[in-house]
């Protein structure tokens, strides 16, 4: 006997319109919250101090591009961005390499303690950096890495690994097993499967992880502040701190310095925007 299927009642048009309106309104609020501070800081970086106080939300009548030149010169931004690059690039490369390898191992390989070891790494997501500052300081000092950029790179890699492993494992679990089986039939080892099959397919997720790792390293203040004391080794967040202390009343220079500090991360996001959107949804349906 044929089964009778009762058609589902369609949602009323009014409910769909209301839900769409709520979603669009929420997105608009999030957009304004994210964009307006950047625009406000950028506009004020092109004004004089008087215009900033008298008309803080107006467009600059005559953009003062010299503010950026002066902030770059007096704030020693020829040194601090370079130090940030020296820290961020190795941090990103090490984070991508270690996270992709560990994520592949946890997702595709079977070995004793696989699941429990992965849970141990996940604990790192719940432990803030502030909670481990004291043992971290003694560890870095014991290794002789104080006032050394390597003493900043290694802790940043370690604190970023739990999130990177979680993201890469989620992606590798979404890939069909037939790809791995075909590679093994062709004679690939575990490392060969990772190198020739898994890694080329994970470029979108790696691009997303690259952005997260770079932003975390570039904007990190606490770890460099704890381990770096010499002025020649300061990164941009430390440079902004001491710059603000020296030029606390010259807001045009402060705004210009802030714009200089966030331009690299903005350019990186624009360059990897498509891959970021693709990779951020990895594992949303299947974990």
Image (spheres, rainbow, N blue to C red):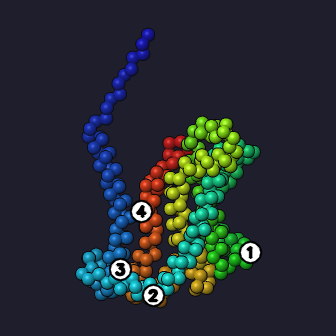
Q: Is residue 181 above or below residue 151?
A: above
In terms of secondary structure, where does tag 4 sit? helix
In terms of secondary structure, where does tag 1 sit? loop
Residue annotated with mark 2: 73
Residue annotated with mark 1: 143
**Residue nearer the viewer, 80 or 160:** 80
Q: CA distance from mark 4 to mark 3?
A: 22 Å
The residue furthest left is 61
Residue annotated with mark 3: 45
Residue annotated with mark 4: 270
**Cβ atoms under marks 4 and 3 closer than 8 Å:** no
Of mark 2 and mark 3, the one earlier in the sequence is 3
Q: Closer to the camera: disc 1 or disc 2?
A: 2
**Cβ atoms under marks 2 and 4 closer than 8 Å:** no
Q: Quadrant of residue 59?
A: bottom left
Q: Quadrant of residue 100?
A: bottom right
Of mark 2 and mark 4, the one earlier in the sequence is 2
Q: Closer to the camera: disc 4 or disc 3?
A: 4
Let me know if residue 119 appears in the view.
Answer: no
Q: Is residue 218 above or below residue 177?
A: below
**Residue nearer the viewer, 121 or 89:** 89
Identified at 31% across, 84% down, the residue is 64
Q: Position of residue 121 (x, y in %)?
A: 66, 55
Q: Position of residue 10 (x, y in %)?
A: 31, 32
**Residue nearer the viewer, 224 or 199:** 199
Q: CA distance from mark 2 to mark 3?
A: 15 Å
Of mark 3 and mark 1, the one earlier in the sequence is 3
Of mark 1 and mark 2, the one earlier in the sequence is 2
Mark number, residue 202: none
The residue furthest front is 186
Identified at 28% across, 75% down, the residue is 57
Quarter that holds the N terminus: top left
């Amino acid at each position: 006997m044929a089964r009778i299927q009762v058609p589902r009642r369609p949602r009323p048009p009014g409910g769909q319109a209301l839900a769409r309106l709520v979603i669009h309104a929420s997105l608009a609020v999030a957009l304004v919250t994210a964009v307006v501070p950047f625009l406000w800081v950028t506009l004020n970086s092109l004004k004089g101090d008087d215009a900033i106080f008298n008309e803080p939300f107006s467009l600059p009548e005559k953009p003062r591009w010299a503010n950026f030149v002066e902030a770059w010169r007096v704030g020693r931004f020829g040194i601090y961005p370079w130090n940030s690059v020296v820290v961020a690039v190795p941090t990103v490369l090490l984070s991508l390499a270690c996270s992709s390898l560990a994520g592949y191992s946890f997702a595709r390989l079977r070995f004793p303690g696989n699941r429990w070891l992965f849970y141990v790494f996940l604990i790192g997501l719940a432990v803030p950096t502030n909670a481990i500052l004291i043992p971290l300081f003694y560890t870095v000092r014991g290794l002789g890495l104080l006032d050394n950029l390597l003493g900043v790179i290694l802790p940043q890699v370690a604190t970023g690994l739990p999130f990177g492993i979680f993201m890469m494992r989620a992606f590798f679990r979404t890939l069909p097993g037939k790809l791995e089986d075909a590679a093994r039939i062709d004679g690939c080892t575990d490392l060969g499967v990772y190198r020739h099959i898994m890694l080329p397919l994970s470029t979108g997720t790696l691009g997303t992880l690259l952005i997260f790792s770079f932003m975390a390293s570039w904007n990190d203040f606490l770890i460099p502040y704890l381990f770096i004391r010499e002025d020649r080794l300061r990164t941009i967040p430390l440079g902004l701190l001491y710059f603000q202390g020296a030029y606390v009343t010259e807001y045009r220079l402060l705004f210009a310095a802030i714009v200089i500090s966030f331009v690299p991360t903005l350019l990186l996001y624009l360059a990897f925007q498509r891959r970021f959107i693709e990779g951020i949804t990895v594992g949303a349906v299947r974990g």
